[in-house]
Amino acid sequence: MTTALTTRDPWTMVPSLGNLDAYIRAVQDIPMLQADEEHTLAQRLREAGDVQAAGKLVLSHLRLVVSISRQYVGYGLPQGDLIQEGNVGLMKAVKRFDPTQGVRLVSYAMHWIKAEIHEYILKNWRMVKVATTKAQRKLFFNLRSLKHQYKNDADDAHVSRMGFSESEIHRVAQELSVRPEDVIEMEIRMAGGDVALEAPADDDYEGPVAPSAYLSDDAHEPSRVIEAHHRDWLASDGITHALSQLDERSRRVVEERWLKVNDNGSGGMTLHDLAAVYGVSAERIRQIEVAAMKKMRKALTDEATA
């Protein structure tokens, strides 16, 4: 049976613009295609570049874009814009659709529609991007829904600084195949907001101090804060981690030579002192020290870039 969609010029059925509710009602009235009709139109587009066939395929799936766009209204962006971006994804899907694969267009198009909407949200949700890597994107679009699904573990007494139990963080990380550290970082990013660099030019403004008033303070300069944090880590956990990579003799050589101070305030044991302890030459102790320091530097570098 031939539907009205295949007998009419599809472009005459494009809903009027300007009113979102009217648009949504109109696309719901556009009939869906039967499987054989869809296959025929897709073949015409693929083999002959039939624009009219492409139009019919797009129009019959506009309701799918509307349905998917509703899943993202919670991000504070206009649904009309979400629909518009989703329609772009739908057109890309129609262009690439291969009817010989035995898959309906509705299943194939969902990926393209969501991809365009995701990209639009990431570009416009904040002035500063909150998700750039694959793991961050996955967390951005799933973290809030997962948080609503999970209940706090009443028996978990150890709670992270965000107020969520450690068990929840690990459950989210395991379900999305990301690191727990990524979950914590994304939660912090999403909890923040954009802040104007300059305060409003208003004499009566009594809001918070704008960043421009304190960014010149070296104590808050981002690179200095990072450097200070790195120095603190090297002086404590970093050294401990690096030493743990050494064998017992190498570790003692480094500790006696660089990490201990005698009662008189001078340095630790000399090369000759350690040579006497291990019954080897001072040159051999120096070689052990050089190799140990090289191994420690590599361990610190690997840990910092992990």
Image (cartoon, rainbow, N blue to C red):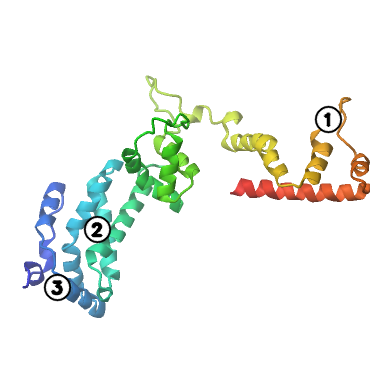
Choose between 194 and 273: the one closer to the eye. 273
In this picture, residue 192 sits left or right of residue 223? left
Q: Nearer the viewer, mark 2 or mark 1?
A: 1
Q: What residue is pinned by disc 2?
A: 87
Give yes or no for contact between labels 2 and 3 (Cβ–Cβ under 8 Å).
Answer: no
Vertical placement of residue 60 versus 232, above or below: below
In this picture, residue 245 sits left or right of residue 208? right
Residue in the picture at 67% in, 35% down: 236
Q: What residue is pinned by disc 1?
A: 261
Q: Amino acid at mark 1?
A: Val
Q: Position of residue 283 (x, y in %)?
A: 91, 49
Q: Amino acid at mark 2?
A: Asn
Vertical placement of residue 5 versus 263, above or below: below
Along the polypeptide, which appears first: circle 1 or circle 3? 3
Q: Nearer the viewer, mark 1 or mark 3?
A: 1
Report, in whole angstroms, how far the alpha carbon at label 2 lies from the one at label 3.
Answer: 21 Å
Q: Position of residue 156 (x, y in %)?
A: 44, 32
